Amino acid sequence: MLETIVIILVVLWLLGVVTSYTMGGLIHGLLVLAIVVILIRVIQGRRI
């Protein structure tokens, strides 16, 4: 499920960057947050 959320955020982030839409900043922030969560889970040794 986490992978699905990350994929959706990546697609939305790319759309925001390509269209220069004002939500791009928010989507970028959410993408960074998702990556941080994944890194924390990997460091803790949990399965993604």
Image: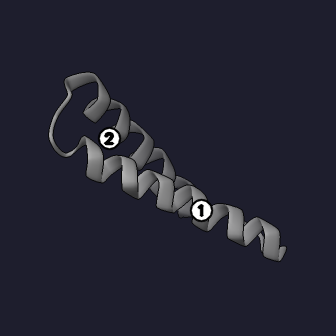
Which residue is nearer to you in this view: 32 or 45?
A: 32
Query: Does residue 17 appear to the left or right of 41 in the view shown?
Result: left
Quadrant of the rendered image containing residue 16? top left
Which element is circle 2 on? Answer: helix
What's the amino acid at mark 2? Leu
- Residue type, numbered disc 1: Val
Q: Looking at the image, which residue sits at the far right?
A: 45
**Quadrant location, the C terminus:** bottom right
| 25 lies above or below 19 | below
Please name the residue shown 45% across and 52% down the image: 31
Please name the residue shown 69% across and 62% down the image.
39
- Near-viewer residue (29 or 44): 29
Callout 1 environment at 10 Å: few (<14), some (14 to 19), or many (20+)?
Answer: few
Q: Which residue is mark 2?
A: 12
Mark 2 Cα-neighbour bin, 10 Å: few <14, some 14–19, many ≥20: some
Q: Position of residue 20 (x, y in %)?
A: 20, 28
Q: Which mark is residue 36?
A: 1
Position in image of residue 38 (x %, y %)? 64, 62
- Residue at 49% over, 54% down: 32
What's the mark number on residue 28?
none
- Cα distance between the residues tagged 1 and 2: 18 Å
Relative horizontal placement of residue 4, taking residue 11 as reference (left or right): right
Dot 1 falls on a residue whose secondary structure is: helix
Residue at (71% x, 71% y) in the render: 41
Q: Earlier in the sequence, mark 1 or mark 2?
A: 2
Q: Name the image quarter holding residue 47.
A: bottom right
Vertical position of residue 41 compared to residue 14: above or below: below
Question: Where is residue 18 shown, x and y percent of the image?
Answer: 28, 23
Q: Residue furthest toward the left?
A: 22
Quadrant assignment, res 22: top left
Disc number lying in front (1 or 2): 1
